Image: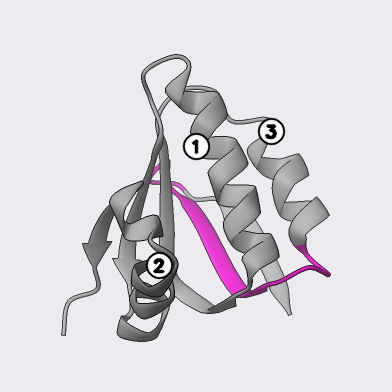
Amino acid sequence: MFEIELTDTGHIAVVGRLDAAQAVKAQEFLDQIDGQCVLDLSRLDYISSAGLGVLLKTHKRLMDSHQGIKLINVNHHIHDIFRYSGFDKLFEIVPASS
């Protein structure tokens, strides 16, 4: 299962597994975002290298206009994936509350 949607708070909720099978859907959604991009990852179960690639491509595009991606409510497991890949140096990451 995978869902990506704009919430009433203006954040983008990413739910389920962001892997190669869902990368195109995620990229198409994120390509429509212009300006501030806050991704709520509280319900993200898994992200693959393909999912990381989607976030990197979007981040680079948004950085051209001095924006970028902020990741919020990042659970320990997902944060580990960002840390092991070095992506924690690229994104502003706000961990989930314990």
Taking the image as shown, residue 38 lies to the left or right of residue 27, namely left
Magenta span covers which residues? 8-22
User: Mark 3 is on which residue type?
Assistant: Asp
Residue nearest the observer in this picture, 45 or 78: 78
Q: Is residue 17 magenta?
A: yes
> Is 80 left, or right, of 49 in this rendering?
left
Dot 2 corresponds to which residue?
82
Side (left or right) of 45 relative to 70: right
Residues marked 1 and 3 touching at CB (< 8 Å): no
> Eyeballing the image, is 32 above or below 82?
above
Instruction: Name the residue carrying label 3.
Output: 31
Q: Residue furthest left?
A: 98
| Separation of marks 1 and 3 at Cα, in angstroms | 10 Å
| Picture quadrant of residue 75 | bottom left
Q: Is residue 46 above or below residue 58?
A: below
Callout 2: 10 Å neighbours few (<14), some, many (20+)? some
First in sequence: mark 3 vs mark 2: 3
Going by the numbered disc 1, the residue's amino acid type is His
Check whether the beta carbons of the residues at disc 3 and disc 2 lie within 8 A of each other: no
The residue shown at (64%, 40%) is 30
Q: Residues within 10 Å of mark 1 (few under 14, many from 20)?
A: many
- Element assignment for label 3: loop
**Residue where numbered disc 1 is placed:** 59
Q: CA distance from mark 3 to mark 2?
A: 21 Å
